[in-house]
Image: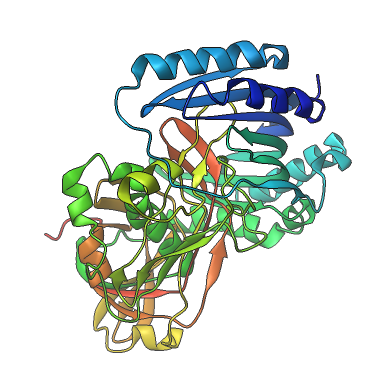
Amino acid sequence: MNIWQVKDQILNLVGKYKSQVDFFAIRLERSQGADIFLRSGKIETLSTGISIGGQVRACHRGGWGFASFNNLTNLESKLQEAIAAAKWVGNEQTILAEVEPVQAQVSLIQDNPQNIELLAKKNLCSHYAEILRSVSDQVVSTAVRYGDCTQQVVIATSEGTMIEQEWADWEMRCSATARSGDLVQTGRETVGSRRGYSDLLNLDQQVVGAAQRAVTALNLPTVQGNTYTVVIDPILAGLFVHEAFGHLSEADMLYENPDMLETMSLGRRFGSEDLQIFDGAAPAEHRGSYLYDDEGVPATTTQLIKDGVLVGRLHSRETAGKLGEKVTGNARCLDYHYPPIVRMTNTWIERGQTPVADLFTDIPLGVYAKNWQGGMTNGEMFTFTAGEAWMIRNGKIAEPVKDVTLSGNVFETLADIEAIGNDFLWDESGGCGKGGQSGLAVGCGSPSLRIKNAIVGGEDLA
């Protein structure tokens, strides 16, 4: 059964069951994609697949029932299961922010991945794998992964919303590991797109750069751990705003945690008057962009920090209702197996006024960090590893160093941003994880930042 052929059935179910609970939503999905993985030039994965399934969520007296399925003929029975579960657990009051019902049919697909032959995708991966290997004999292993996906979704609610939406996504990940004796270093490059396959072509220079970073790092000195003034580039700054601050803006992390809700009180100052932070799916053609979220709420742009002050947060209908705030269209699910939860979309720090060259001025001893290798957060604490870094000496970029990690408290770090560059860059490489739903496409953007009192890890000072 095709998901586009069940609209009449859905409408009949809405009429039949909408009086039995306070609210329910039906989400049907058809996904099709390719997955290719080459390790050291050898194919480990070369596959295509199609997945069809759905989910139903019901809410009654504040209790939620959820059921997912991969056989559309089970739709009515799964709706009945979700309704029964909601009635079993509901014992309070259903509070959902009100939204106007939407009827829409939209497509965000500009270039369909299915129009590109699998062999062409495989050959592209082999090309990048060969580039990685050719950089140096010290490159001992490489990895190239390609993925694409088209997703068609139907969302219907008991309130009268009926939305058909489709999109496409591409991603290419390349990495090289270099070795010299016991020393091992890795360089990575990832490119993602919601526009088209062409964005994954002609990446030779970036791929070479990933391998060169790994080889070069073998002979670099390790940075001495200390507290420095640091300058971070837009890619590392974008990771920071997403991981360290963005997750704390997701309202489902707050409304059941009074301490964190107090910490994230609207009106609290977090930084200078130059600091502006946003999240939103409304800006077009980024990896976190869409027209309607997985509750059928229209996409928006939400300002989180205005002139250094917290002014907004990200919501589902339930969190907005419980906190008495406006919906933001941030309820998202990875696929039909999972219920929508509050997720970031495209998160960015607005461009500043300081010329990038001036960010380094008057720093007697500091660190310039670019790109990212990885990182982790725990509440308001974070640790990130830079992809490449240099010392700053007397206001100038000096010798390169390796193993640079930046750590600290996000609120203290926001307050320690001394200057915001007049450059800006979107990083479309991100795949966000939360609540067991990993790999959700997001976008991150930022200018370069100058931050004082940053804790930089490396070799201990002796």
- Residue at 24 percent across and 78 percent down: it is 365
- Residue at 69 percent across and 36 percent down: it is 153
Residue 94 drawn at (x, y percent): 38, 33
Residue 457 drawn at (x, y percent): 24, 56
Pick the quarter of the image with the N terminus: top right
Q: Looking at the picture, does residue 182 appear above or below residue 51?
A: below
* Closer to us: 138 or 88: 88
Count the marks: how many?
Answer: 0
The reply to whether residue 330 is in sight is: yes
* Closer to us: 284 or 245: 284
- Residue at 59 percent across and 43 percent down: it is 296
- Residue at 56 percent across and 24 percent down: it is 56
* Residue 286 relative to residue 201: left or right: left
* Closer to us: 97 or 275: 97
Residue 149 drawn at (x, y percent): 71, 38
Toward the front, the furthest residue is 19
Residue 163 sits in quarter: top right
The reply to whether residue 41 is in sight is: no
Figure coloring:
rainbow
Pick the quarter of the image with the C terminus: bottom left
Residue 450 sits in quarter: bottom left
Residue 354 drawn at (x, y percent): 41, 87
* Residue 377 relative to residue 31: left or right: left
